[in-house]
Amino acid sequence: MSHASGSNQAEEGSTRKRSRTVGDQGRRSITLPAEDTMEFTDISLGEIHVGTGEEVKVWKVHIKRFAGMSAWLKRAFITAVSEQAGVDLPTVKLPGDDPRIFQWVHNYIYAVSFAGLKGADVPVINNAGTSGSHDDDIVIMSSRVKVEDHDNPLASGSAANQNAAAAQTPDANDDLKEVAADAITPRDLMVLYLLAYKLEIFSLRNKAIDALHTWYHPDAQEKRKPSTVAGAVGAPANNDDYEPAKLLPFGRVPWMTDVQYVFAHTPDGNSLRRLLIWTCVMCLFSKRPQKKKLPEDWNDVLTSTGEIGCAMIKTIASLGWVKGTKDCKDIVIWQKFTFHEAETSIDLDV
């Protein structure tokens, strides 16, 4: 082999390695461009401004901790330092983002810094908000119900359950202001996921996916161990080598407007997209209480855009069901980790 051909193969191998780190899925460690070599000390401080106009909120942060968790923020602070010469606090601005959601990002980064990944978590969804199932036998919470038991809002002693009989199922036209100030909705966790997606905080993206998985599938069995994971990238939708599936009750139904929102802000093959599409397909084929219907917004969204409906059809087709056969494979939701996007090594020495 000539030296030239060996060099070309080395370059091709390097290109393949780089391309594998760019995808949305898989295991990955955060790597930064060679030119991003600026170092920050433990006491280097900066500011992050989130929102616009009167809604702007300012956080003073330790740059090293935030740059260590987010490659996007590291690049932003490096740019801020070089462009804002002489200022005491280099500033990064996020005008298009929600200060309330960024507060959760802020809390998460500091929690990881002091307690590690296992010691950091995201808020627990405790309210269906202005989107969710119209079936109050399935989703008993309303935008007008204040949930006291954040660990288990459906617990028998919780305020939500005690008031469930009087609660009205939220309607798509409800005023957003009717949602309690301390309510945390599925859409909130989707927005958190998308902000973490933008900031390249992969562990936080996975935490948000976990929270949504728990909300929509509270009874899913974590112990099931298929040889090939259904719904995972590159895997068949279902397989014959897994523990028998438990017949789960009809779970919470996603608002299709929430699914549409995620589709508008994520690429094809995205993990959160897959979780929501599998959830929607399960809702279609799960046994529902008599006379209970899917939310009306499903019709509105699915007749106005074909992308989501096409994704659902592809998912159903991937099940391999054959007309006239009795061997229909069950639709099951797999463990949370099968929807994770990356495992990251967090470098605080930046």
Image (cartoon, grey):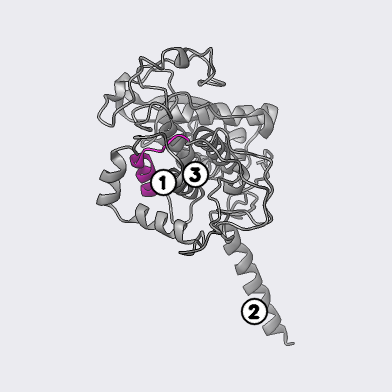
61 and 111: which is toward the camera: 111
Disc 2 to disc 3: CB gap under 8 Å: no
The numbered disc on residue 197 is 3
The C terminus - image quarter: top right
- Amino acid type, callout 2: Asn
Q: State whether residue 12 is above or below residue 160.
A: below
- Amino acid type, callout 3: Tyr
Q: Earlier in the sequence, mark 1 or mark 2?
A: 2
Residue 99 vs residue 108: left or right?
A: left
Residue drawn at the location 41% of the way across and 54% of the way down: 312
Residue drawn at the location 51% of the way across and 21% of the way down: 154
The N terminus - image quarter: bottom right
Image spot of residue 52 (x, y percent): 33, 30
Taking the view exactly as shown, the residue that stands out farthest to the right is: 1
Does the rendering let one see residue 334? yes
Dot in front, 1 or 2: 1
Dot in front, 2 or 3: 3
Number of residues whose C-alpha sits closer than 10 Å to that of mark 2, classed few (under 14), some (14–19) or many (20 or more): few
Does the rendering let one see residue 276? no
Residue 144 in which image quadrant: top left
Q: Earlier in the sequence, mark 2 or mark 3?
A: 2
Residue 235 vs residue 290: left or right?
A: right
Number of residues whose C-alpha sits closer than 10 Å to that of mark 1, classed few (under 14), some (14–19) or many (20 or more): some
- Residue 289: in magenta span: no
Residue 185 in which image quadrant: top left
**SS at mark 3 in the image:** helix
Image spot of residue 119 (x, y percent): 67, 28
Start-end of magenta stretch:
251-265
| Mark 2, residue position | 8
Prevalent SS, magenta region:
helix
| Mark 1, residue position | 284
213 and 223: which is toward the camera: 223
